[in-house]
Amino acid sequence: MLRAEGVVVSYGRQRVLGGVGIEVSPGQVTGLAGPSGCGKSTLARVLAMLLKPAAGRLTVDGVDVRRWRHRVPRELRGQVALIFQQPRLAVDPRFTLLDVIAEPLRAAHRSIEHARELAEEMGLTPELLSRRPHEVSDGQLQRACVARSLTLRPRYVICDEMTTMLDASTQAHLVARLEAYRLESGAGVLAITHDDELLIRWTGPSGGSIRHLSEMAPAA
Amino acid sequence: MKPPPRLRVEGLSVRFHLPGATVQAVTDAHFEVRPGQCLALVGESGCGKSVMAHALMGLLPGNASIEGAAWLESGDTPPVNLIAAPEKVLARTVRGRRIGLVPQSPATHLTPVRTARAQLTEALRELGNPDRADTLAERAGLSPSDLDRYPHQLSGGMAQRVVNAIALAGDPWLIIADEPTSGLDRPLVEATMTELRRLADDGRAVLLITHDLRAAQQVADHVAVMYASRILSLEPAADFFTGPRHPYAAGLLDALPSRRFAAIPGQPPELTDLPEGCAFRPRCARATDDCGRLPLPPLGDNRVACHHPLESHVAR
């Protein structure tokens, strides 16, 4: 279980999350909905250990997260992956697509062969892998980001409006790929989106619940 | 009697020349938009639909080469070919005055250091519109006090209304909305679409460019589907959403979460390396040898560029 309790985050004097909790169960797709600006992405960053909350607790399969960002211990770091809304802001523009996908493997001192397999499963050809982000479409870049998120076989994958910028067919493909990973690995997925039809369809097969952030806690 | 205005695009093609490659961004596009109507141009990212918008506004970069014509027939003056007209004509008589642009992201389109009022007033002054900013704001659904805020103090919906008001400052009859909903949540998407529909119902022509089929369904009278630089089908919206005739259009609709939620196999071709004949052929279940020949574009009575269109189950 990936569990956050009583998470409080403020940006300056603006309180964004006022004591929010959420649980993501392994093997299930949990949905998270809410209007623009309600703090969905902030909660996603906390869950991925990229943002230290002012108060509250985060546990990954019972292990307390005590250090954040680049101080997260290696055994915890690979457990939770985050896929962002805008792939262009989530990759180093100097990297080729293969470098993008292989980056977590390099950081973990592992062979990058697995990156090529993941890329192939995402429909990225060797020719595309040699290009840089500005030479590919948003859809192709997000495919690379999905492949990158799966390289270290995370226990939890957090998808923050992963398909908002993409067409219907690419959206269906990316969701199907994550569903295949969930079924094969038993990982838990947190699907964050304001698209109600997508949430119902995505959480349905695993019987996961849908939470609405505006109802979760009063943002004081 | 003066003829009613319309935008008539005839055989429009746009190419970008890069070192060692040519990008075919738009190829042989034909369509029309008239006042009172909304045409939605849908397609995935990288299919060329935004380039179309930029071509019509005369905002393409210098390495673009353009063929064909896009006639802006405003009724009161001789038609202007948007593709060939000099920048001076576009700047003084077209942009803002005959064509209003609803931009992709209201939050980034507005200048952060000036109030909404300052920006709207500037647009009115530059376009020679004697109306007051308050009047325009009220028409766009804003209260005058909202105008005294800076962009970061506006909610997404309010920022959208401010850019709509600016787009209307020169009273254009044609509105081009380029992905006006990207990044907005569903209630805001619906509000934006309601607003575009209202503009069409008020007698303006609306060209909506989007990848969001649900948004298109809410406003469009006609839907054009673009794929790998070409328009593959152009049908009345009711026909498109109930029984699309092009296999690609059917695949896109089938991928919606409210439908089969199944992706189209494969990926679109590169615009620098398009296959001979129909570009959708490698991904199409209905493809035969015939598809190596280019099908006729949607034009006149022909609604789909396909040798093997699906039967429509809509009664005609």
Image: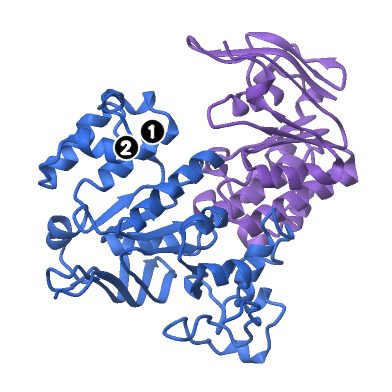
Name chain A's colour: purple
Q: Residue A148 in the image: state x and y as whole percent.
A: 70, 43
Name chain B's colour: blue
Q: Residue sitting at 27 percent across and 31 percent down?
A: B116
Q: Residue sitting at 13 percent across and 62 percent down?
A: B89
- The answer, for residue A101, to whether it is visible in the render is no
Answer above or below: position of B296 versus B115: below
Q: Residue B296 in the image: state x and y as whole percent.
A: 49, 87
Are the residues under badges 1 and 2 in a single subunit?
yes
Is label 2 in a helix, a strand or a loop?
Answer: helix
Looking at the picture, tell me which residue is in the foreground, A115 or B66.
B66
Q: Residue B225 in the image: state x and y as whole percent.
A: 51, 69
Which quadrant of the structure image shows residue B10?
bottom left
Answer above or below: position of A3 versus B163: above
Tell me the crowding category of disc 2: few under 14, some 14 to 19, or many 20 or more residues within 10 angstroms, Cα based: many
Q: Quadrant of the N terminus of chain B?
A: bottom left
Answer above or below: position of B248 versus A1: below
Q: Horizontal placement of A151 versus B5: left or right?
A: right
Query: What residue does disc 2 label?
Result: B162
Is label 1 in a helix, a strand or a loop?
Answer: helix
- The answer, for residue B7, to whether it is visible in the render is yes
Q: Which amino acid, by three-letter code, is at mark 1?
A: Met
Query: What residue does disc 1 label?
Result: B158
Q: Residue A99 in the image: state x and y as whole percent.
A: 64, 45
Q: CA distance from mark 1 to mark 2?
A: 6 Å
Tag 1 subunit: B
